[in-house]
Image: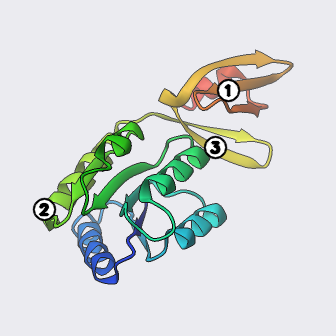
Amino acid sequence: MIIMICDDQKNELDNINQIVSEYSFANSELPISVKSFLNPSEMLDAIHKSGAPDIALLDICMPGILGTDVAKEILDMNDSETDIVFLTASSEFAVEAFSLHASDYLTKPYTKERITEALDRVIKKRANRFFLTVSCGREIYRIDLFQILYAEARNHNVEIHLKSGKVLKTHASLSELKKTF
């Protein structure tokens, strides 16, 4: 599980990183990798290179780009598979954050317990999701079943239509896909 953290304040970033690292140590059965960024552009560059995280902990008020805009870009790239937790000093962005289906919205100053509770809730929710792994040419997709509108067999292929409007084509048959559950 990859957790990315972005906050433009170094002391805040270090604090969050410490809390998440302690969480990872306390939950050693979960393979958690933590990546931290002071700059949202650097975080987005890393995501474009290596893929979106499972969980993103984002400050909202950062120079150059709002955390809500970063979240939109992550979700657009990732078909909503990333869980977003906002960490901010301002409550004015809460409505927008929840319109992006944020998993949580923590206002500063927050406690270690509050971040731990948010991580517990998000990870439990992720564990209850059902995913379908599909090979499409040279790429492999892990698709949240709740993001699939429908699938149809067509010309010895299966087309999987997602809520985002994206269509994935695989050479697997419907019966082969069913076996992966």
Q: Nearer the viewer, residue 151 or 82?
A: 82
Looking at numbered disc 2 in the image, what kind of residue is underneath it? Glu
| Separation of residues labelled 2 and 1 (CA atoms) | 40 Å
Q: Residue at x 52, y 46 (%)?
A: 75
Residue 13 drawn above or below residue 130? below
| Disc 2 versus disc 1: nearer the observer | 2
| Separation of residues labelled 3 and 2 (CA atoms) | 34 Å
| Disc 3 versus disc 2: nearer the observer | 2
Name the residue tied to disc 3.
Answer: 141
Q: Position of residue 7 (x, y in %)?
A: 38, 71
Looking at numbered disc 3 in the image, what kind of residue is underneath it? Tyr
Res 133 → quadrant? top right
Q: Position of residue 132 (x, y in %)?
A: 56, 35
Q: Nearer the viewer, residue 42 or 160?
A: 42
Looking at numbered disc 1 in the image, what kind of residue is underneath it? Ile
Q: Which mark is residue 36?
A: none
Residue 172 drawn above or below residue 15? above
Task: Kindly tell me whether residue 126 is visible in this rendering.
Answer: no
| Label 3 vs 2, first from the N-terminus | 2
| Label 2 vs 1, first from the N-terminus | 2
Mark 2 closeness class: few <14, some 14–19, many ≥20 residues within 10 Å:
few
132 horizontally vs 33: left or right = right
Q: Nearer the viewer, residue 67 or 147?
A: 67
Name the residue tied to disc 2.
Answer: 113
| Separation of residues labelled 1 and 3 (CA atoms) | 11 Å
Q: Residue at x 44, y 77 (%)?
A: 38
Secondary structure beneath dot 2 equals helix
Secondary structure beneath dot 1 equals strand
Q: Which mark is residue 160?
A: 1
Q: Residue at x 59, y 69 (%)?
A: 46
